[in-house]
Amino acid sequence: YQIEKKNKRSVVTVFGEISYWRRRYVCPGRKAKYPLDQLMGYDKYKRYSVLAVKNILQVSAVSTYRNTALAVNTLSNFNISHSQVG
């Protein structure tokens, strides 16, 4: 594998937004991959961590999307809209 490029990625966790630099590795005949994302458990194109999604789902199970967004925005370090909750 060889380094193709470096990208910056931001992920929202229950503690707030974190940003980090990651390297994309390529090998002829294989798919390119980001080993750091795989190691940390972040899926492709996902912005929220697993724990943040779990907490949002627990609140949305007993409330409307608008009230869930209000609760998350009030009690956490990040903002989310009601459509993102849906």
Image: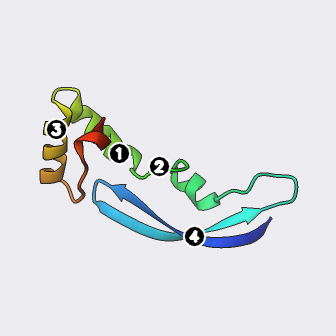
- Secondary structure under the numbered disc 2 in the rendered image: loop
Please indicate whether residue 6 sits to the left or right of residue 30 in the image: left
- Tell me, yes or no, whether the two marked residues, 4 and 2, touch with CB atoms within 8 Å: no
Q: Which amino acid does label 1 sit on?
A: Leu
Q: Residue at coordinates 13% horizontally, 38% vertically from top-left?
A: 67
Mark number for residue 66?
3
- Secondary structure under the numbered disc 1 in the rendered image: helix
The mark lying in front, picked from 3 and 4, is 3
Q: Residue at coordinates 28% horizontally, 40% vertically from top-left?
A: 83
- Mark sitting earlier along the chain (3/4): 4
Q: Quadrant of residue 5?
A: bottom right
Q: Which amino acid does label 4 sit on?
A: Asn
Label 2, label 3: how many angstroms apart (C-alpha)?
21 Å
- Tell me, yes or no, whether the two marked residues, 1 and 3, touch with CB atoms within 8 Å: no
- Secondary structure under the numbered disc 4 in the rendered image: strand
- Mark sitting earlier along the chain (1/4): 4
Q: Where is residue 86 in the image (x, y as percent from the top left)?
A: 30, 35
Count of numbered circles in the view: 4
Label 1, label 3: how many angstroms apart (C-alpha)?
20 Å
24 shown above or below 49: below
Label 1, label 4: how many angstroms apart (C-alpha)?
24 Å
Q: Nearer the viewer, residue 42 or 4?
A: 4
The residue tagged 1 is: 51
Please indicate whether residue 80 sits to the left or right of residue 63 in the image: right
The residue tagged 2 is: 46
Mark number for residue 7?
4
- Mark sitting earlier along the chain (2/3): 2
How many residues crowd mark 2 within 10 Å: few (<14), some (14–19), many (20+)?
A: few
